[in-house]
Amino acid sequence: MPNPKPGAADNADLAEPTAAPAKRARGGPKGLRIADVAAQAGVAPMTVSRVFNNPETVAPETLERVRQVVQKLGYVPNRLAGGLSSSRSRLIAAIVPTIAHSLFSETIQVFSETMSRAGYQVLLALSGYSDSSEEALLDAVLSRRPEGVLLTGVAHTDSLRERLRNVGMPIVETWDMTDTPIDMLVGFSHYEIGVAVAEHFLQRKVRTPGLVSANDERALARRDGFRERLAQAGIHEIAEVLVSPPSSVAVGKAALPTLMEQAPRLDAVFCGSDLLAIGVLGASRRLGLAVPSQLSICGFGDLEFATETTPQLTTVRVDGTHIGRTAARCLLDRLEGRDKVVVTDVGFRIVERETT
Amino acid sequence: MPNPKPGAADNADLAEPTAAPAKRARGGPKGLRIADVAAQAGVAPMTVSRVFNNPETVAPETLERVRQVVQKLGYVPNRLAGGLSSSRSRLIAAIVPTIAHSLFSETIQVFSETMSRAGYQVLLALSGYSDSSEEALLDAVLSRRPEGVLLTGVAHTDSLRERLRNVGMPIVETWDMTDTPIDMLVGFSHYEIGVAVAEHFLQRKVRTPGLVSANDERALARRDGFRERLAQAGIHEIAEVLVSPPSSVAVGKAALPTLMEQAPRLDAVFCGSDLLAIGVLGASRRLGLAVPSQLSICGFGDLEFATETTPQLTTVRVDGTHIGRTAARCLLDRLEGRDKVVVTDVGFRIVERETT
DNA sequence: CTGAAAGCGCTTACAG
DNA sequence: CTGAAAGCGCTTACAG
């Protein structure tokens, strides 16, 4: 047997159980360290480290012995120390406006599952919809020294983009499209969605379309595409209600009367979210407007329930799950040394559930 | 002026800009350290540390000078090092089955907002609905040395509960109720919800109720309350369909015919989630059953849209936002030294939207 | 109000 | 396959 250290009997309790107090100068006893495991297994700390990080470089007997001690003691490595020492935090930051209203939550779900299968953990940073504190948020995130960052394509300020370019870690922007990504990109064009919805309305011979939307960056991009395509078709007057996020059913409900004041002959509404669309649908019911025959309504997000409960609505479907998975793979490829630059347009689809 | 160190002129570039290479033995240049800031500001590293952690103990002039250097250099402290050194990771772990299907996502949203306002960051750990890998997940979480943990009341194995009791950090369990919490608890009784829904059905003179539910721990507790209360009323035969999570509209739709095979005179269904309830509603429409007059349907979760789109459904409302906020406060109180034990029952409400 | 020394618990980079 | 030394970038616990 190679190197059976004396005093490393399998049944021995902690080596020198009472002779240790001198060493711990700072706090009290803070829990088990790699040295405790090493002592009891009769190996050097380095070997215990290898058991966790490079088990294939350790002799089978040693491996087994150390693992038993780890199990018996309930030792859990300290990754603050490990990360500091190795410059590998095994942490990935995900910066998202919100997970409460679920458009992004499935992206984060899949992203997180994929990253954790690869041995990384996700630090969740909620940015809200305001840019105000983004610098502070970024500081907080970077202070953890993540190895990669997922951004939800909120319009970053120039200063922020600049900082992110300079940190030298892989970054994926998602849920948006641009010609000048910080690094990698998995998303789609909100502008093109606006164009597509406009064309959808035009095909339906809509003449007086309106728009209800939150005034966040991406919703406004959809609006721009919508307006410009309609302008090409000669429609320039577009009733519009912009609201602050978060949008909701109630907000949508309140918006329809306002739109109809602006445009009494309103015959279509493009809504910034399915929740808004459901609100507009409810309001149109009260006003006795048939949907979609008298009023076409298009939402955004394709919430699962909507197909069943509100087949009169059209919506725009985006595959958030696909975005999450792809973004994770992009980061992992980079982290594993594959040097690629990726811009993936995952596209979107207009879903008409029922033509009545 | 106190202690104006020589060579600390405000416009000087990095002190000894080229004379440093000897020191960095391990990796390449890894970025700015506190020593870089200290050198340029003409103070000791300790003082820079104070500027971040105890600014009130630093002389105003020094504070200002250091902050300018920090700004100019773009220095961001390394919290891996800080956490290791101080045993304060400023990290809180949140363990949640999933955030994709949104019952928990608003709890996490509010929890995260509250914690970050207090200077903590949230490490998100998705456990899925299986207990299988929970030990590994807990290891991963504990390896970051969080200062507190939020659990979403999945039935933890005994071994897990034992470990959590022993880690000696504040823990809040949420979304459930028990007589033997690990530490603090903010939730409600799923069993009592089942009882309440049974009573709701009994009031409506229901005679042949059924149940569709995912087979996760908490849904099963609701089922138990439901069945036992019905048994007290003399109803023992209860049609039942149990499915694996995640539940969905499609699953609910498929379940109704199965229930009706078991109980052809079915006149009520308690569903494990609003999505299931929407599916059951859709299926009953196809079968020509009027809801709620011929078939009462009760969901769980009170999704926002449902009030508007499916007023025929009854549901159980739980305030996820309140849970998140309260859980955060419990942890923060503990972290700030207030030694309290908390069990909060936030309750629930049965919401009948329309009596037809 | 400020600083020099020691230590937090790991891993790197060698050496054997 | 294994280990001793040095270092990762901070903060604690003093001392002045």
Image: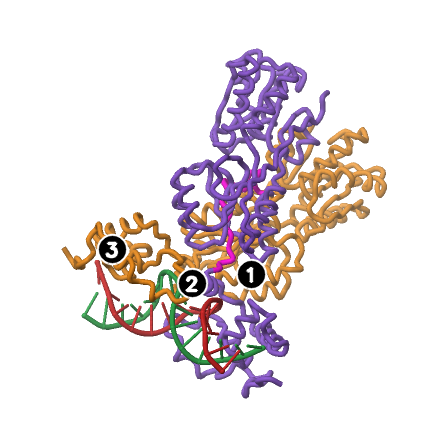
Chain colours: A purple, B orange, C red, D green
Query: Which residue lies at the image location 73% right of the left edge and 50% below the top edge?
Result: B228
Left or right relative to A123: residue B153: right
**In the visual, does B214 lie left or right of B27?**
right
Residue B153 highlighted magenta (yes or no) = no
Q: Which residue is mark 3?
A: B41
Q: Is residue B57 visible?
A: no
Q: Which mark is residue B140?
A: 1
Residue B159 vs A261, above or below: the answer is below
Q: Secondary structure at mark 2?
A: loop
Q: Position of residue A246 (x, y in %)?
A: 51, 33
Question: What is the distance, in whole Å, between disc 2 and disc 1 at their CAs?
Answer: 26 Å
For marks 2 and 3 on the same chain, the one whose residue lies earlier in the sequence: 2
* Amino acid at circle 2: Gly
Chain letter of the residue carrying label 1 = B
Amino acid tagged 1? Ala
Quarter of the image containing the C terminus of chain B? top right
Q: Position of residue B61 (x, y in %)?
A: 20, 52
Q: Amino acid at mark 3?
A: Ala
